[in-house]
Image (cartoon, rainbow, N blue to C red):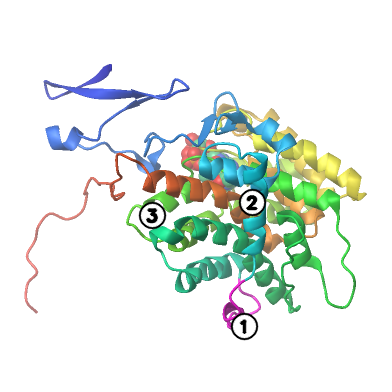
Amino acid sequence: MSSAKLVFEGREIDLPVIRGTEGEIGIDVSKLRKETGLITLDDGYGNTGSCQSAITFIDGEKGILRYRGYPIEQIAERAQFTEVCYLLINGHRPTNEQLSKYRNDLTHHTLLHEDMKKFFEGYPPSAHPMAIMAAMVASLSTFYQDTPEEADLNIVRILAKSKTLAAFAYKKSIGQPIVYPRNDLSWQANFLRMMFAVPSEDYERSPVLEDALNLLLILHADHEQNCSTSTMRMVGSSEANLYASISAAICALWGPRHGGANQKVIEMLQQILERGGDLQSFLDRVKSREVRLMGFGHRVYKNFDPRAKLLKGAADRIFNELGIHDPLLDLAKQLEEAALRDSFFVERKLYPNVDFYSGIIYRAMGIPTEMFTVMFALGRLPGWIAHWKEMREDASGYRIHRPRQVYVGENAREFEPR
Ligand code: ACO
């Protein structure tokens, strides 16, 4: 094993070097403080590897994303979301038999405990569905126990019930009766029916919408150590249960710098349109740091985000198939082109991320803006679970996640009696 040398105040310290299977190199500083009293400081963890993981590989410079070694482009074209859940969580593709059992399990655990319905009644109609999701997922831990015997079942339960929770939250927000899941439908068809069916008329399935949803879910399914996944690992490292950890990850995802950006992109595009569609004056506001260009920029991708590329292509196809025209899609494309010609964005290597086009597709599917980040959460669920499980099942054990700090506050002083 090679090592790196740190020289500090005349002293040389050897640090072990870990090499990943794709050539990434990490300097292992885990013993640094014990041996030297020093810590590393890395605001926002931009340069810190928090774990070794075998789930997802990203090369941000080349625009590569792979789940368990499989390129995202191939998975997006050839897989169903349930298979991707299995792949991410279990580390290998299921056999046909395993897949059909998995699909069956994910279907037969979709119902919620009837008592949970009462919880929805307590929220005001204006409640953001992400708040409802976080609360309801945490509440699942009051119905299902965190025992080793139920560990796998709890994973199936949350994968199955999350879409029911999301659809019920939506129905509650618009005052419509909830629609119960059905066991003869796929994950996607079941969710869309629970979202859009009403008791007063027949519900017609749409293969176009089901395929679009499948693609969106797959593209969001994992993205290694992002903010919400790191939260999932962080909370899970305290041995908090699966539902509590997911609830925390949902809250982390909600923020506009992370998953909440998909809602903000649409709001931004609408504002530009309302102000007459003047892209240059909007970009000037971005450059003067008055606002951020939502759906642009990424901590890891310094080239294109392959998910954004796939979604941009899919948007045209889906709009054609649905026979829809949305001025926001035209505006988004013009905005992307204008930004990519502008040295501010070029120099900072800012490209559209997954959130730039996803919201436009959700809109075309009839999903309301406030539900966009919930859709992201439904897709990201298998990734969160895969990371939680990888950490908890690590044969070499895991430590509670507990970063250090460099204290810059007051020195010791007397607390004088009054
Ligand atoms: N609009 C304008 N300027 C930006 C943007 C943006 N969207 N993103 C980054 N920048 C600028 C920063 O101001 C900074 O400029 P400076 O060096 O002159 O100060 C430079 O680019 C680097 O940006 P950081 O904020 O340091 O990059 P970081 O890696 O910390 O942040 C993030 C990444 C949060 C995604 C950021 O690009 C952003 O806020 N984007 C908009 C929100 C968004 O789309 N989030 C979704 C991300 S994808 C996801 O979570 C699924």
Residue at (17, 55) in percent of width and height:
410
Q: Indicate the amino acid at tag 3.
A: Gly
Q: Residues within 10 Å of mark 1 (few under 14, many from 20)?
A: few
Residue at (64, 51) in percent of width and height:
101
Q: Looking at the image, tell me whether mark 2 or mark 1 is earlier in sequence order.
A: 2
Disc ID at residue 101: 2
- Chain part drawn in magenta: 112-127
Q: Position of residue 161 (x, y in %)?
A: 61, 64
Viewer-proximal residue among 16 and 202: 202
Gap between marks 3 and 2 measured at Cα:
28 Å
Q: Residue furthest top?
A: 2
Left-right relation of 186 to 99 = right
Disc ID at residue 364: none
Q: Secondary structure at mark 2?
A: helix
Q: Position of residue 216 (x, y in %)?
A: 70, 46
Q: Which residue is mark 3?
A: 236
Q: Looking at the image, tell me whether mark 3 or mark 2 is earlier in sequence order.
A: 2
| Rendered position, 257 above or below 15 | below
Q: Quadrant of residue 342?
A: top right
